[in-house]
């Protein structure tokens, strides 16, 4: 019986378990009023960042490519989600239905963006790929800063000049106002929808990883030439991972944006991409459980350290550097290995 | 005429990018790492020059020298404390550490100098602007282009003629073999960081003399642009940094003048992507052959 359940399935279910357990904990805490206001406000952003970390982990950890522009996909998702929701405000009155449609559209458009970016980019390697993803992130931010979008009874109006150039009817309204970003967003994201999105993202990524396609992606990561020699289409598999990741990041963006009444393109800049990368690296590259925990802790931590307002980012930076040095330096690793080695031996001794 | 004027301004801005790009490209060539904290060393250099010049009233030369010395020491210290323990670690680990250092420097600056915008004085105003017909070249631009040429010639001579420079090239070619030949790799890497950071201080003064807004995040955008310039020209190559930097500056200024101010950054990055698609290792980058 034991052999029938393989290790990856167990890990998958542990991850679902963790998310559901955390949901239960936070839900009880907020229901009994034990959750501070700041933390309550953070629940949806935490969900969005967890999804972002999972999406980036698929690219960095599983596909082995460094992306420094993932916030760009989040941005595309956020804006397309907000626009969809605003355009459907009169035709779809149910908040939940509108949210679902907005997220699906956001994921689709982000996936298209991922495809457009992925085709040229995935031919490059290593650091060059990193810099091009960075460049794409900046381009998306820049273009969105110049974009004006409005809606009226005739449909969507798009302009790259100004709000007046949209030529809206008197009943119409501008949704995206260039540098001011999207305004007047209906807040239809909820914590439950966030958690469901996290579970869906986990489900998609874990099933992808443990499928034939996932094994091909990992084979290419481990040895590109050997995988190519075995007849795997390198670009195709890398593209599958990249586009899936972009779609998931887009849905995270929609979830994130519909939690605020307004959002600017500047919110999704290079620093956001880096922030998510930090979650992935600190959580352990390729380790989904680690990504979830790191994203939760690191989003909540600066808020919990508000009292030390001036010094909290400084502490964050120092902790980041120290963790990287301790976990990657050979000497400290050997030292930690020794400590754990002692424990292991003791345990084995006890077992005997 | 306006076109030539823009072209010269572009070369001026590009020269600053080229000087910053040198810091990226040299460090990448030798330590094989993307030093994301380089932009923040520029920012620190700017603040040091600002404080010594405005608050302490030091003469221009003394302020510039102070800025160079502080940045050089900072570069060596950062390398020693944060990057040296990570020799042989994965490049991603080093990258994240560099980002940590970048956050650290920005927040230190935020605590010391607060987030209030400081207006940087033009420290190279002793050079008068020159007018030829309709074209006016500002003194800052002249000094910047001149400094860039001087630094390029100096660095090329240093890396090709002196023993230390040759050691640097040897380490970037093959670290293991260089070590076997008796080259002290750690000293060479420290030296590279020192030179790169010293250049960052010069770049800071030249950049801020032209664009005088000084805040704790001042360094990040020129940093990213210069990094792009280094990749553009072929990362690891010194002449590549010069070409990449100047091309980037010219494209940026021309895009601002003729297409759109807001979209200029997007255009710069789009050109970078197009170049990388056709020349995947940059304009002057070496082709890496894969061995099976």
Image (cartoon, coloured by chain):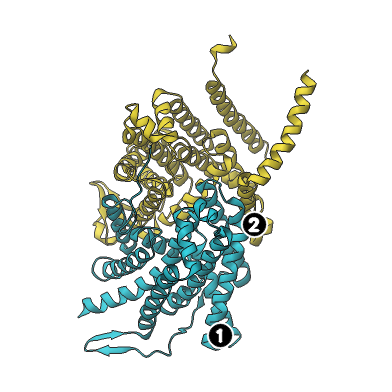
Chain colours: A yellow, B cyan
State the quadrant of the N terminus of chain B: bottom left
Measured in 3D between alpha carbons, the distance from the residue under mark 2 to the one under mark 1, in whole angstroms, is 35 Å
| Badges 2 and 1, same chain | no
Q: Is residue B196 left or right of residue B292?
A: right
Q: Residues within 10 Å of mark 2 (few under 14, many from 20)?
A: some
Residue B145 horizontal/vertical position (percent): 36, 78
Q: Quadrant of residue B63?
A: bottom right
**Residue wearing tag 1:** B62
Q: Nearer the viewer, mark 2 or mark 1?
A: 1
Residue that protrudes farthest toward the front in the picture: B181
Q: What numbered label is drawn on residue A312?
A: 2
**Residue in view at x 45 percent, y 30 percent:** A205
Residue A221 horizontal/vertical position (percent): 43, 35
Q: Secondary structure at mark 1?
A: helix
Return the residue nearer the eye: A330 or B232: A330
State the quadrant of the C terminus of chain B: top left
Q: Residues within 10 Å of mark 1 (few under 14, many from 20)?
A: some
Residue B120 horizontal/vertical position (percent): 49, 79
Q: Is residue B75 above or below residue A152?
A: below
**Residue in view at x 48 percent, y 28 percent:** A206
């Amino acid at each position: 019986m034991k052999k029938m359940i393989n290790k990856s399935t167990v890990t998958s279910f542990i991850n679902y378990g963790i998310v559901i357990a955390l949901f239960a904990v936070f839900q009880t805490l907020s229901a009994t009023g034990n959750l501070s206001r700041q933390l309550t406000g953070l629940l949806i952003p935490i969900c969005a960042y967890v999804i972002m970390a999972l999406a980036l982990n698929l690219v960095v950890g599983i596909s082995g490519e460094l992306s420094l522009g993932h916030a760009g996909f989040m941005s595309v998702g956020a804006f397309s989600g907000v626009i969809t929701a605003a355009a459907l405000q009169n035709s779809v009155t149910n908040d939940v239905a509108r949210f679902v449609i907005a997220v699906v559209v956001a994921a689709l458009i982000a996936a298209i963006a991922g495809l457009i970016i992925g085709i040229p980019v995935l031919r490059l390697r290593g650091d060059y790929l990193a810099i091009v993803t960075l460049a794409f992130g900046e381009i998306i931010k820049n273009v969105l800063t110049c974009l004006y979008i409005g809606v009226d009874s005739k449909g969507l109006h798009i302009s790259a000049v100004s709000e007046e150039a949209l030529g809206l009817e008197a009943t119409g309204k501008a949704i995206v106002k260039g540098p001011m970003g999207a305004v007047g967003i209906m807040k239809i994201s909820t914590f439950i929808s966030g958690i469901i999105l996290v579970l869906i993202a986990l489900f998609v990524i874990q099933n992808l990883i443990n499928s034939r396609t996932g094994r091909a992606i990992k084979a290419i990561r481990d040895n590109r030439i050997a995988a190519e020699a075995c007849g795997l289409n390198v670009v195709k598999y890398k593209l599958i991972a990249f586009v899936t990741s972009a779609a998931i990041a887009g849905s995270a963006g929609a979830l994130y944006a519909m939690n605020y009444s307004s959002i600017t393109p500047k919110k999704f800049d290079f620093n956001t991409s880096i922030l998510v990368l930090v979650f992935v690296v600190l959580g352990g590259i390729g380790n989904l459980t680690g990504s979830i925990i790191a994203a939760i802790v690191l989003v909540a931590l600066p808020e919990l350290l508000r009292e030390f307002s001036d010094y909290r980012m400084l502490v964050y930076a120092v902790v980041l550097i120290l963790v990287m040095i301790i976990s990657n330096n050979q000497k400290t690793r050997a030292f930690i290995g020794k400590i754990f080695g002692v424990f292991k031996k003791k345990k084995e001794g006890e077992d005997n | 005429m306006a076109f030539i004027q823009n072209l010269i301004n572009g070369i001026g801005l590009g020269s600053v990018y080229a000087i910053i790009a040198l810091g990226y490209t040299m460090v990448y060539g030798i330590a094989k790492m993307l030093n994301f904290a380089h932009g923040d060393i520029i920012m620190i250099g700017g603040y040091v020059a600002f404080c010594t010049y405005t608050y302490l009233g030091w003469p221009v030369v003394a302020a510039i020298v102070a800025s160079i010395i502080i940045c050089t020491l900072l570069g060596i210290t950062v390398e020693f404390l944060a990057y040296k323990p990570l020799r042989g670690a994965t490049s991603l680990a080093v990258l994240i550490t560099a980002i940590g250092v970048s956050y650290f420097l920005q927040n230190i600056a935020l605590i010391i100098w607060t987030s209030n915008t400081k207006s940087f004085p033009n420290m190279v105003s002793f050079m008068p602007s020159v007018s030829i017909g309709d074209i006016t070249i500002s003194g800052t631009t002249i000094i910047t282009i001149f400094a860039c040429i001087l630094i390029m010639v100096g660095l090329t001579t240093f890396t090709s003629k002196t023993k230390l420079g040759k050691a640097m090239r040897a380490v970037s070619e093959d670290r293991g073999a260089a070590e076997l030949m008796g080259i002290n790799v750690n000293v060479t890497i420290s030296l590279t960081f020192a030179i790169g950071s010293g250049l960052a201080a010069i770049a800071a003064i030249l950049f801020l003399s032209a664009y005088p807004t000084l805040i704790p995040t001042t360094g990040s955008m020129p940093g990213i642009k210069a990094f792009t310039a280094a990749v553009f020209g072929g990362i690891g190559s010194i002449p590549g940094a010069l070409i990449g930097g100047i091309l980037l500056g010219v494209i940026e200024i021309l895009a601002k003048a003729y297409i759109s101010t807001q979209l200029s950054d997007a255009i710069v990055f789009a050109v970078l992507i197009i170049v990388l698609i056709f020349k995947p290792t940059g304009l002057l980058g070496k082709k890496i052959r894969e061995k099976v």
